[in-house]
């Protein structure tokens, strides 16, 4: 007998006017960018960097997340279908975003940001400076990415999607919107809470040293903790696509192994080199000397 099951029957739409609807998922997805922007704004002020540079980074990240997440879902999870129906790749409103694809998108667009925008900002950018700039940018992005993961998983909860297998635990959710009658693991909450704790950890690590952290520390820990927790929580999830039924490890787990390994290697390298990021000093005018 399930004594404390939670009937979950939340409407994924906040309100609708005709064919136009505002959904909880969209609101939470947008909120992740808004809250992340203000956190990054504080970091940029600490680093003596301009708001204009942050605006450009935000644009690069938004493109990386949206394009990467969509292409990741299409080609990592359902390649046969989308190769047969290529126009549906553009139909983002039909659903289908993958966090692994978003991670790839961020890695690529941040590299472009470091190569293009930082060169404009600093005037020159040699290979050594590019690597340091790229790694530092990934480090600070890791802080807000962890928080964004929390918002997105809460959006999944409001959509009654990506939940777990049946459970006898007292906090099982019955997802009535999906026609479920048995309590299931609320894996969206498990995963979301993991990401929220990771965010607080990274936020603390950054501000404890006022930003003067080892190059690569936060991004390495992000790959380890985010994809490590994802790997284990996937054991509790229902299959996302039909072909996962015959797999020992599902696709989410398989795609989490490489980032986890890269994170471990990055952490070893970072702790071996021990190169600390140095805060940019503001320019001193001749009048203030």
Image (tube, rainbow, N blue to C red):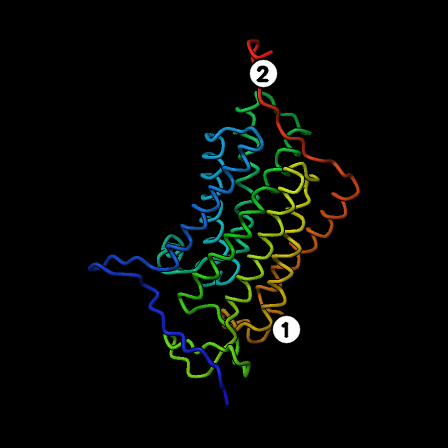
Residue plotted at (44% across, 66% down): 157
Residue plotted at (74% across, 36% down): 275
Instruction: Categorize mark 1 by other alpha carbons within 10 Å: few (<14), some (14-19), many (20+).
Output: few
* Farthest-out residue, right: 272
Residue at which label 1 appears: 248
Residue plotted at (47% across, 39% down): 58
Q: Secondary structure at mark 2?
A: loop
Q: Is residue 185 left or right of residue 281?
A: left
Disc 2 or disc 1, which is closer to the eye?
2
Q: Please state the horizontal and vertical placement of residue 156, each as a whole percent of the image.
A: 44, 63
Q: Is residue 33 left or right of residue 143?
A: left
The image quadrant of residue 225 is bottom right
Q: From this view, report whether residue 133 is shown above or below residue 16.
A: above
The image quadrant of residue 194 is bottom right
Residue 284 marker: 2
Q: CA distance from mark 2 to mark 1?
A: 61 Å
Which of the image's four quarters has the C terminus? Answer: top right
Q: Please state the horizontal and vertical placement of residue 188, each as a whole percent of the image.
A: 50, 66
Q: Secondary structure at mark 1?
A: loop
Q: Please state the horizontal and vertical placement of residue 205, each as a whole percent of the image.
A: 65, 46
Q: In the rendered structure, which disc, 2 or 1, sits on the residue that comes first in sequence?
A: 1
Q: Is residue 189 left or right of residue 255?
A: left
Q: Please state the horizontal and vertical placement of residue 93, each as a whole percent of the image.
A: 35, 57
Q: Nearer the viewer, residue 162 or 201?
A: 201
* Farthest-out residue, top: 286
Instruction: Categorize mark 2 by other alpha carbons within 10 Å: few (<14), some (14-19), many (20+).
Output: few
Tell whether label 1 touches label 2 (CB within 8 Å): no
């Amino acid at each position: 007998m399930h004594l404390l099951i939670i009937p979950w029957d939340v409407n994924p739409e906040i309100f609708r006017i005709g064919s136009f609807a505002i959904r909880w998922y969209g609101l939470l997805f947008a909120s992740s960018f808004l809250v992340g922007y203000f956190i990054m704004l504080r970091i940029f002020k600490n680093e003596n960097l301009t708001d204009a540079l942050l605006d450009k980074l935000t644009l690069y990240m938004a493109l990386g997340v949206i394009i990467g997440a969509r292409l990741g879902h299409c080609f990592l999870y359902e390649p046969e279908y989308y190769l047969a129906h290529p126009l549906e790749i553009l139909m983002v409103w039909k659903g289908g975003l993958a966090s692994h694809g978003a991670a790839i998108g961020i890695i690529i667009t941040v590299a472009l940001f470091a190569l293009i925008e930082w060169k404009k900002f600093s005037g020159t950018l040699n290979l050594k400076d590019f690597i340091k700039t790229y790694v530092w940018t990934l480090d600070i992005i890791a802080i807000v990415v962890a928080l964004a993961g929390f918002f997105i998983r809460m959006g999944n909860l409001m959509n009654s999607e990506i939940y777990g297998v049946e459970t006898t635990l007292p906090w099982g959710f019955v997802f009535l919107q999906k026609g479920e009658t048995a309590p299931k693991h609320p894996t969206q909450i498990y995963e979301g809470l993991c990401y929220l704790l990771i965010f607080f950890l990274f936020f603390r690590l950054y501000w404890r040293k006022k930003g003067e952290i080892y190059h690569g520390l936060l991004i390495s820990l992000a790959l380890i903790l985010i994809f490590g927790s994802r790997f284990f929580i996937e054991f509790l999830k229902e299959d996302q696509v039909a072909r996962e039924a015959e797999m020992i490890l599902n696709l989410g787990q398989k795609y989490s192994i490489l980032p986890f390994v890269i994170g471990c290697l990055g952490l070893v390298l970072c702790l071996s080199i021990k190169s600390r990021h140095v805060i940019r000093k503001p320019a001193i005018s001749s009048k203030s000397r």
